[in-house]
């Protein structure tokens, strides 16, 4: 199993260059049964990363381009009258896939954005009064443009909280960009990718995440982090119990990727910026002036490891 996971990371790294930490975070998010939000400028590889993950993991993948005129039925599906049978027949939408790429999710209206809420939380959708289960595993990978760009609708806090992690890819370093400029087209390389896992095998790997040991001392540290977020005056609201569970699941997945069967404080620290960066909103002008990375660094420095 370890060899398979290492091969997954290795193959994706041939497509997304110079971003090893972000790749491991994305894979940890999927192994922890979460959903991933990638926020960055257009053209830095957000869609390519989602496509590469789906291909290497052997999962059925569909991409939905979110626009201002997209309707909920375009995502969930719709019933159409069938003259031959004399009744309505449901035509499932793209949400009935293992991986759904919600591309530029914040360009759609809030009504359309909310169509994904039940799917992300309950692994099911209710259309025209009937509830339908989604295939397993099920992941939503959403990309988002910065909010200052024209034509964007900010995601509400309730929907942001459904994403286990939010990451940024950023610009590649000089060496990676040179290889990118001189190498083959990324689409061509994607077409040549072979799957390493299958859907059933991925479910087996996910079940292993729950067996990674968490000590009482580690839970003390996690609760200290949660408690600090609720007491500190720098944030509008503290972290919820669901955020605590998100940190725990993510840290377990990170430890698994590191080849360990127990969680260390370093695992919590590695995933914390991606897990809580979009959940903690600054409450002071001083905090707002800091980048997410700086805020998370100060957050970790404020809570000593037991």
Image: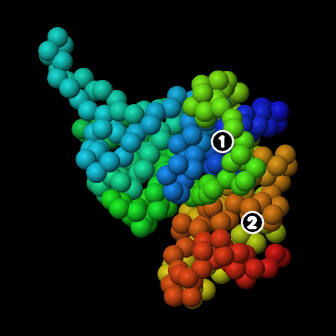
Badge number at residue 269? 2
Q: Nearer the viewer, mark 2 or mark 1?
A: 1
Q: Is residue 283 visible?
A: yes
Closer-to-camera residue (242/304) = 304
Q: Which residue corresponds to mark 1?
A: 181
Sequence-first disc among 2 and 1 = 1
Name the outermost residue toward the top. Answer: 84
* Depicted 87 relative to depicted 210: above or below: above
Q: Is residue 133 visible?
A: no
Q: Position of residue 258 (x, y in %)?
A: 82, 49
Real-space Cα separation, disc 2 to disc 1, in angstroms: 34 Å
Q: Is residue 111 left or right of residue 276?
A: left
Q: Residue at x 46, y 62 (%)?
A: 146
Q: Position of residue 236 (x, y in %)?
A: 49, 81
> Are discs 2 and 1 less than 8 Å apart at CB?
no
Q: Residue at x 34, y 39 (%)?
A: 75
Q: Position of residue 45 (x, y in %)?
A: 57, 46
Q: Secondary structure at mark 1?
A: helix
> What is the quadrant of residue 199 in the picture?
top right
């Amino acid at each position: 199993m370890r060899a398979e996971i290492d091969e997954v990371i290795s193959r994706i790294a041939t497509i997304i260059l110079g971003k090893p930490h972000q790749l491991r975070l994305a894979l940890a998010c999927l192994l922890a049964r979460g959903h991933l939000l990638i926020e960055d400028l257009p053209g830095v590889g957000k869609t390519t990363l989602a496509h590469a993950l789906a291909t290497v993991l052997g999962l059925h993948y569909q991409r939905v381009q979110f626009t201002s005129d997209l309707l909920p039925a375009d995502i969930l599906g719709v019933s159409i009258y069938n003259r031959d049978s004399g009744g309505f027949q449901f035509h499932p939408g793209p949400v009935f896939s293992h991986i759904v790429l919600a591309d530029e999710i914040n360009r759609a209206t809030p009504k359309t954005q909310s169509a994904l809420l039940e799917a992300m939380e309950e692994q099911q959708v209710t259309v025209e009064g009937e509830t339908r289960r989604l295939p397993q595993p099920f992941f939503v990978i959403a990309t988002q443009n910065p909010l200052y760009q024209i034509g964007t609708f900010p995601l509400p806090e309730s929907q942001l909280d459904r994403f286990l992690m939010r990451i940024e890819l950023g610009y590649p370093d000089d060496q990676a960009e040179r290889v990118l400029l001189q190498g083959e087209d990324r689409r061509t390389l994607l077409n040549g990718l072979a799957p390493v896992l299958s859907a059933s095998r991925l479910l087996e790997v996910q079940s292993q995440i729950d067996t990674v040991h968490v000590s009482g001392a580690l839970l003390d540290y996690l609760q200290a982090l949660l408690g600090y977020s609720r007491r500190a005056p720098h944030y509008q609201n503290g972290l919820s119990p669901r955020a605590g569970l998100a940190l725990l699941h993510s840290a377990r997945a990170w430890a698994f990727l590191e080849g360990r069967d127990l969680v260390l404080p370093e695992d919590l620290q590695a995933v914390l910026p991606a897990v809580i960066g979009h959940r903690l909103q600054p409450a002071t002008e001083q905090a707002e002036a800091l980048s997410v990375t700086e805020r998370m660094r100060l957050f970790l420095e404020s809570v000593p490891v037991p």
